Image: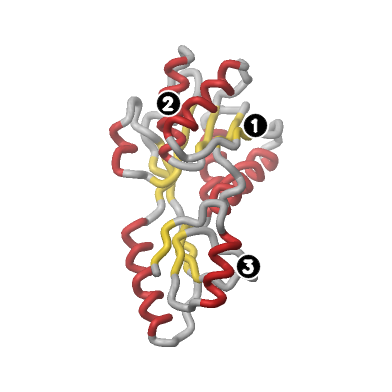
Amino acid sequence: ILLIGQSDQIDVIEQTARRYAPIVVWGAHVDGYTQVTVGSDNVAGGRIAAEHLIAQGRRNLAFFGNPDVPEFADRWKGFRTAANKAGLDEPLLLPTHLTTEASRDAIGAFLAKKPLVNGIAAASDVIAMSALQALSDAGLHVPADVAIIGYDDVMVASQTTPPLTTIRQDVARGAALMVDLLFEKLAGRTADSVVMQPALVHRASA
């Protein structure tokens, strides 16, 4: 089995991995867990996003993403740690979900409260693209009023208006690694999780 994403089911996946060896998961590596995973260093990715916003003079930061998802929790951790290290106020957290409509509605309700925010990191490009729409609906300009960074670098990230700055995960390398690790497990050999380094892709949104 190649399983893409842990969502909020990491403990269920762990129960399965303890009984069924040939499974490799795209997601967050958690110390002490049996499941073999491939994914990016999500803490580093969150830190990179915060540092980029801070370097641009953004001082009032927010993070959009549900920390019940392990990958998102790590991204929030890195983002929050970098903001605290820079001496900023605690970033705001909006625990929105992944679906486009749900995240757009949640972000719209958040913006209606007129929060003091000029830099946003989204836990995924899908959430970031929903934020672009919600910000436009609220009469705010990106990046003049609010800068926004996504995560993943999906194919359409360069085609949004403005093009989306994001944190890239090397999906092609990750996919190849997942297959290699699965064959190792099928052969009865030990396979270790792989954590890849993310990279900032600088475009116009931040």
The residue indicated by pointer 1 is 92
Nearer the N terminus, badge 1 or badge 3? 3
Q: Helix, strand, or loop for circle 3?
A: loop
Observer-nearest residue: 5 or 174? Answer: 5
Amino acid tagged 1 = Leu
Classify residue 197 as left or right of residue 65.
Answer: left
Q: Can you name the residue that lies furthest to the bottom here? A: 188
Q: CA distance from mark 2 to mark 3?
A: 35 Å
The answer to which of 190 and 62 lies nearer the viewer is 190
Which labelled disc corresponds to residue 132? 2
- Separation of disc 1 and disc 3 at Cα? 27 Å
Q: Is 139 left, or right, of 161 in this rendering?
A: right
x, y (%) of residue 136? 42, 18
- Screen quadrant of the C terminus: top left
Residue on which the image places disc 3? 31
Residue 138's place in the image compared with 56, above or below, is above
Mark 3: which amino acid? Asp
Which amino acid, mark 2? Leu
Inspect this view and state whether residue 121 appears: yes
| 171 horizontally vs 24: left or right | left
